[in-house]
């Protein structure tokens, strides 16, 4: 069984650029959640995708967008990058949607994004 | 809205001594609560979860937590710390999404 993988592991961008982060969910999981973890803070929920549809969103602006593909892998896209977007971006996969009883989220190692 | 407060940003213990990481939550109804651990350069790992069953929850690696509704607390404990326990620990409350606390860094001295 393959765990959650994310790519790339590190990324450096400049203000105003756009970035795409990728996540492959664990085998059999149909739900992917994305989190932003700023340095010294806990992860903050960005959004969740369930069966290719956005299924819950945290307090992040529309320039944070995502996709989920038929194989349940996912992308996080951030447009017009700002310095405060520098963070570790975590992806977590699970089985079931938001309304289902809790199914454990399995986290990937994250992508560290630095915005200069 | 639900939220969680981890009362200590840093806890330092000696190897073999007890560990206590404190967490208080706010919730308008019965919450689901979790503890996660994050080792450097590794993904978050679930230690244990409370979902309205037994109030004393046992997790992996000898950790346990007790849900106390009257105190709105969900403190994490371990009887004897090991060097490998050194990591960042997060208390989490689940509403429609997962709300993480700011984290507690556990240092274990030899």
Image (cartoon, coloured by chain):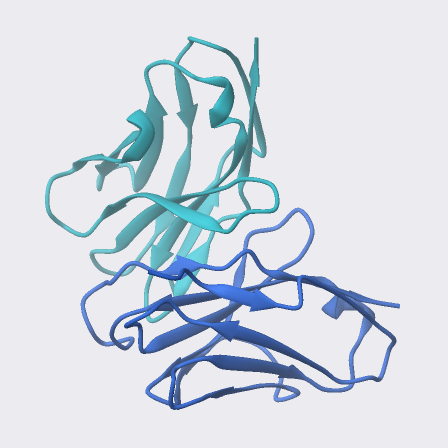
Chain colours: A blue, B cyan
- Residue B76 vs B82, above or below: the answer is below
- Provide residue A105's location: percent of width, then percent of height: 35, 61
The residue drawn where x is 35% and y is 76% is A31
Q: Residue furthest front?
A: A1
- Provide residue A116's location: percent of width, then percent of height: 89, 68
- Provide residue B16's location: percent of width, then percent of height: 42, 8
Out of B52 and A49, give the one closest to the viewer.
A49
Q: Report which quarter residue A4 is drawn in.
A: bottom left
Out of A114 and A8, give the one closest to the viewer.
A8
- Residue B33 vs A105, above or below: the answer is above
**Callout count:** 0
The residue drawn where x is 18% and y is 67% is A101
The residue drawn where x is 20% and y is 56% is B30
- Provide residue A23's location: percent of width, then percent of height: 52, 73
Quadrant assignment for the N terminus of chain B: bottom left
Q: Residue furthest left?
A: B53
* Residue B96 left/right relative to A73: left
Q: Report which quarter residue A12 is drawn in.
A: bottom right
- Residue B37 vs A16, above or below: the answer is above
Q: Report which quarter residue A38 is drawn in.
A: bottom right
The residue drawn where x is 51% and y is 64% is A5
* Residue A46 left/right relative to B98: right
Quadrant assignment for the C terminus of chain B: top right
- Residue A93 vs B29, above or below: the answer is below
């Amino acid at each position: 069984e393959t765990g959650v993988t994310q790519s790339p592991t590190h990324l450096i961008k400049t203000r105003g650029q756009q970035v795409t982060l990728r996540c492959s969910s664990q085998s059999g999981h149909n739900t992917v959640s994305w989190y932003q973890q700023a340095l010294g803070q806990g992860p903050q929920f960005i959004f969740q995708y369930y069966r290719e549809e956005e299924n819950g969103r945290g307090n992040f602006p529309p320039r944070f967008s995502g996709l989920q593909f038929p194989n349940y892998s996912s992308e996080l896209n951030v447009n017009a990058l700002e310095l405060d977007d520098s963070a570790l971006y975590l992806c977590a996969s699970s089985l079931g949607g938001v309304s289902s009883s809790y199914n454990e989220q399995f986290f990937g190692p994250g992508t560290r994004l630095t915005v200069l | 809205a639900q939220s969680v407060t981890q009362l200590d940003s840093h806890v330092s213990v000696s190897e073999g001594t007890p560990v206590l990481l404190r967490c208080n939550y706010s919730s308008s109804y019965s919450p689901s609560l979790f503890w996660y651990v994050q080792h450097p350069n590794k993904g978050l790992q679930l230690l244990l979860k409370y979902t309205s069953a037994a109030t004393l929850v046992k997790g992996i690696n000898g950790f346990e937590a007790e849900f106390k509704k009257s105190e709105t607390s969900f403190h994490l404990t371990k009887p004897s710390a090991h060097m490998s326990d050194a990591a960042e620990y997060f208390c989490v409350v689940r509403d429609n999404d997962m709300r993480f606390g700011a984290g507690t860094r556990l240092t274990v001295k030899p």
